[in-house]
Image (cartoon, grey):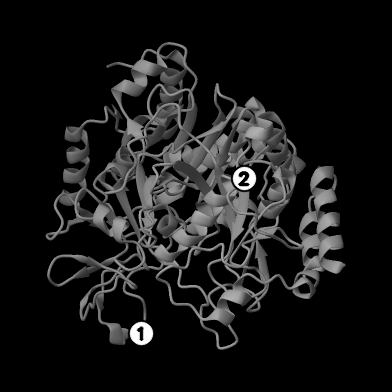
Amino acid sequence: MACKNQKALDLVKEAQALMQPDAVVWCDGSKAEYDKMSDIMLKNGSAIPIKKRPNCLHFRSDPSDVARVEDRTYISSKHKDDAGPTNNWVDPEELKKTMRGLYAGCMKGRTMYVIPFSMGPVGSPISKIGIQVTDSPYVVMNMHIMTRVGTKVLEHLGTDGKFIPCLHSIGAPLAPGQADSKWPCAPIEKKYIAHFPEEDLIWSYGSGYGGNALLGKKCFALRIASNMARREGDWMAEHMLIMRLTSPEGRRYHLCAAFPSACGKTNLAMLQPTIKGWKVETLGDDINWMKIGPDGYLHALNPEAGFFGVAPGTSYQSNPMAMECLKENVIFTNCVLTDDGDVWWEGMGTECKHGIDWKGQDWTPEKGTPGAHPNARFTAPARQCPIICADWENPAGVPVNIIVFGGRRATTCPLVFEAFGWDHGVFLGAQASSETTAANIGAVGDLRRDPMAMKPFCGYNMGDYWQHWLNMGDKVGYKAPRIFYVNWFRKNAAGKFMWPGYGENSRVLKWMCSRYDNKCEGQMSAIGVVPAPGELDLDGLTIDPQNLKDLLTVDKAAWSREIPDLEKHFNAFGSRLPPRIKAQVELFKQRVSS
């Protein structure tokens, strides 16, 4: 089907004139198109077939292009204060001038692919449409998996539908006769990931990797969408998993959870409960759009169609359902290729004595360096998850009962507690923190704040973002979800984890559901409502009684020592800090100091 939307046609015409590709191809989302992209990349040597996994390919990126480049990512609002202290800012006209200079002729020798895509099921009242231009077949293939691509999107867009323009180039034009590299990209100082929130516009240049290039993901679904949601006033774009829990009696609960990196978000989304009779189904593992439904409740929808997961650490112990997703039709990036024709990564739970590492070099464990890049990825269709929920593509979304925030804390923070109310819950999310480890920059044990796990992804001033949370709570009123905070990572004096985690986390989720149904009273503390003795279902679990006591104990003195850091965190937002959050800070100080 030909595009009939004049604004979309104008976008492509202007991009073609500026970027000067050799050809322009409109993507139709078909399997034949996906296979054609695969063939192109197999023939030029950038893709490697994985013999042990049908229809799976492996790619190795350039060592300069392995992850999101946060220091090259910009929220280019008209006024710097609208971007806020958590974002990089450049004046929009200055940034556009720089990027137009880079875009000029950037696709010479290459094909421009035009990708009409929908975030969310096509036609859902929660979904949004984007149109991305790119010169990367790798991006086309990944967008096929991660979004809904093609003619159905154009049909729904019609002649005057709204879409988000997404310009992307790897930034590596080819002169006549010039040989291409296996992972073309621009040097780091020429990489730009730019967002223009007042125009709902995304420009990306120089990177072919992940969220820098798959513009439907963090760029659209979080940075631009978070600002759109605030502006439109009745929805939210959040960095959250979505899951359904079903009790033995058939009672359904929908839970959304926001965790910073390395806190087990995907593992929780695909949890295998250890408590008898409970069932978990996955609706999404990373992004959540929540809109107020006709019934007055928040309804959650996963706008993505696939999983773009971190491979290292994924195993049959940590996440068996994710492993089951990866048997076919998957794109792997920066893993190890084994001698017997499979992929491997650290923490997979199996041994690899020899392989070819993510840099294309011979590798053995004795080499002393990781074989897979720590940010090695898999791109897998969500429909392949064995526990994907039947409602994961329900255009109305699912009603949200519970929202969970969390962090990675070895000390102080208990296993679980519930907020006293919506404002207090927003405060808990706004102060969410993890302790640094040897792998982070900074002194071990220092706190790193990542509000709502959105610090890298909020597309506007985070003080205004918290106000939007408060406004949404006012709008849903008594129908608001209950808010909880968890910490799976407490350690004892010997440095050992006190809680077993993984499937045992279902015991904590069951307590949340009991609280939602007002079936247990909990125990009041200075920071929230913790489980009262005997309320956690520990049937079949062996746990040291002292560990359990410590996991649920609130040490007011330890919390009071965090007040200076907490005040520093919130003071950074100045006059944009909502008075209701400021009031929650004062209440927290009073409770932990009394």
- What type is the residue that disc 2 sits on? Arg
In this rendering, would 112 be left or right of 41? right
Task: Measure the alpha-carbon separation of dots 1 and 2.
Answer: 46 Å
- What type is the residue that disc 1 sits on? Gly
In this rendering, would 39 be left or right of 248? left
User: Mark 2 highlights which residue?
Assistant: 482
Location of the C terminus by quadrant is bottom right
Residue at x 78% of width, y 66% of height:
565
Let me know if residue 207 appears in the view: no
User: Percent x, y for residue 571?
Assistant: 82, 55
Q: Is mark 2 on a helix, strand or loop?
A: strand
Q: What element carries label 1?
A: loop
User: Percent x, y for residue 462?
Assistant: 70, 46
Residue at x 59% of width, y 37% of height:
226
Q: Which of 311 and 169 is in front in this view?
A: 311
Determine which quarter of the picture holds residue 489: bottom right
Give the label on residue 489, or none.
none
User: Mark 1 highlights which residue?
Assistant: 368
Q: Do the residues labelled 1 and 2 touch (CB within 8 Å)?
A: no
User: Percent x, y for residue 507?
Assistant: 47, 61
Location of the N terminus by quadrant is top left
In this rendering, would 155 be left or right of 215? left
Q: Residues within 10 Å of mark 2 (few under 14, many from 20)?
A: many
